Image: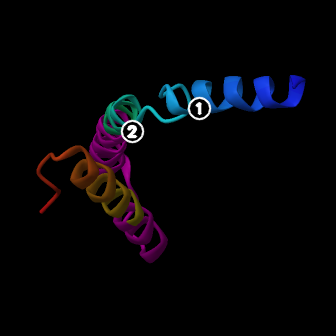
């Protein structure tokens, strides 16, 4: 009897939406994508100001731009051209 009550309680808790709040999760993911987009935009701009002119510096810049584009696209913002 105790097991049945426990199963019913856990089932009710799970079906109540306590484990599955997709709207809140999507909002948090969007906010994090927006934050990371802004971080990499700033990083890209700062790096361009002070970067060396060699192959490694160019690859680093390309990496920052790729990550900026990835997170800005997830956030629904325009990507770097």
* Secondary structure category for the residue under label 2: helix
Q: Residues within 10 Å of mark 2 (few under 14, many from 20)?
A: some
x then y, percent, for residue 44: 32, 48
Per the rendered image, the range of residues in magenta is: 33-62
Magenta-colored segment: predominant secondary structure: helix
Question: Of the numbered discs in the image, which one, if any, rests on residue 75?
Answer: none
Front position in the image: 73 or 60: 73
Taking 73 as reference, is 15 above or below it? above
Residue 73, percent from left and from top: 22, 54
The one of 3 and 76 positioned closer to us in this rendering:
3
Magenta stretch contains residue 18: no
Side of 76 where 21 appears, left or right: right
First in sequence: mark 1 vs mark 2: 1
Question: Closer to the camera, 68 or 53?
Answer: 68
From the image, tell me which residue sits under label 2. 29
Residue at horizontal 24 percent and vertical 44 percent from the top: 75
Mark 1 element type: helix
- What whole-number distance in Å separates the C-alpha atoms at marks 1 and 2? 22 Å
Outermost residue toward the front in this view: 1
* Placement of the N terminus among the 4 image quadrants: top right
Picture coordinates of residue 32 (x, y %)? 39, 35
Horizontal placement of 19 versus 61: left or right? right
Q: Is residue 64 above or below residue 8?
A: below
In terms of image quadrants, where is residue 69?
Answer: bottom left
Residue at image coords 44%, 63%: 60
- The residue labelled by disc 1 is 14
Q: Quadrant of the C terminus?
A: bottom left
* Residue at (31% x, 38% y) in the render: 30
């Amino acid at each position: 009897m105790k097991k049945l009550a426990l199963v019913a309680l856990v089932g009710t808790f799970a079906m109540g939406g306590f484990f599955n709040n997709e709207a809140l999760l999507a909002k948090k993911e969007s906010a994090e994508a927006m934050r990371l987009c802004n971080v990499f935009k700033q990083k890209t701009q700062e790096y361009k100001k002070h970067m060396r002119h060699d192959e490694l510096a160019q690859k680093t810049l390309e990496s920052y731009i790729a990550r900026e584009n990835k997170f800005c696209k997830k956030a629904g913002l325009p990507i770097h051209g």
